[in-house]
Image: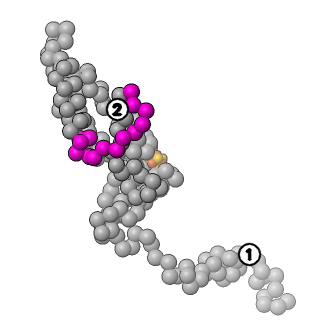
Amino acid sequence: MADGGLFARWPVIRQLRGQDGRGQAARSARTDALRPRVEEADSVARSVCPYCAVGCGQLVYVKDGKVSQIEGDPDSPISRGRLCPKGSASKQLVTHAGRQTTVLYRRPYGTEWEPLDLGTAMEMIADRVTRTRRDTWQQEHEGKVVRRTLGIAGLGGATLDNEENYLMKKLYTALGAIQVENQARI
Ligand code: SF4
């Protein structure tokens, strides 16, 4: 029987020899030329996926001051390097061409969105927060000092990351708001 015959065609032998379509048999010059996407990153930062309550660990790679890749963090005891499709695509939160990058405002009873420059929008928000806090401030409630406002509440979105939520909680607490919640619950 040619070339070892039946023994040579035995799958275990073919796998050991790299002839079964895997290992060396599946490699090509292009395979050998492929490089990891993160190889040229300038730095990497640890973060947490903002999408859901699992809180998978992420490695955020940066090149030339921009996010170049986001991958699972093998050192995370929560996810051990894994990300679901949403977490794997979270780079698009900062890079996708379809992201909304300008302020849109719909005035009370308005039916259309109006573009606003960022400075104007920030002034409007600051005015409303200041006015609401002043008008709804409670120094005491039922004989107890509470120093709070029930006129301001915070509801974070799922795509806010850990660090953003931390800063927002500090701001709301400083304002005296006690109704602070986040959809992600990380
Ligand atoms: S969305 Fe996916 S990757 Fe992100 S925390 Fe949840 S399970 Fe993990």
Q: Nearer the viewer, mark 1 or mark 2?
A: 2
- In percent of the image, x 37 and y 35: which residue is there? 106
Horizontally, is 143 left or right of 58 in the view? Answer: left
Q: Is residue 16 visible?
A: no
Q: Position of residue 118 (x, y in %)?
A: 26, 46
Dividing the picture into quadrants, the one containing residue 158 is top left
SS for tag 2?
loop
Q: Quadrant of the C terminus?
A: top left
Q: Amino acid at mark 2?
A: Arg
Instruction: Count the numbered circles shown.
Output: 2
CA gap, disc 1 and disc 2: 71 Å
Check if residue 99 falls in the magenta segment.
no
Q: Position of residue 121 (x, y in %)?
A: 26, 41
Above or below, comparing residue 106 to residue 80 in the picture? above
Check if residue 118 falls in the magenta segment.
yes
Above or below, comparing residue 133 to residue 53 in the picture? above
The residue where tag 1 is placed is 11
The residue where tag 2 is placed is 107
Local crowd at mark 1 within 10 Å, few (<14), some, or many (≥20)? Answer: few
Horizontally, is 98 left or right of 21 in the view? Answer: left
Horizontally, is 23 left or right of 4 in the view? Answer: left
Q: Is mark 1 within 8 Å of ligand 1?
A: no
- In percent of the image, x 40 and y 58: which residue is there? 95
Q: Earlier in the sequence, mark 1 or mark 2?
A: 1
Above or below, comparing residue 43 to residue 85 in the picture? below
Magenta span of residues: 109-122
Q: Position of residue 70 (x, y in %)?
A: 41, 60
- In percent of the image, x 65 and y 81: which residue is there? 25
SS for tag 1?
helix
Dividing the picture into quadrants, the one containing residue 143 is top left
Q: Nearer the viewer, residue 127 or 143?
A: 127
Q: Nearer the viewer, residue 67 or 11?
A: 67
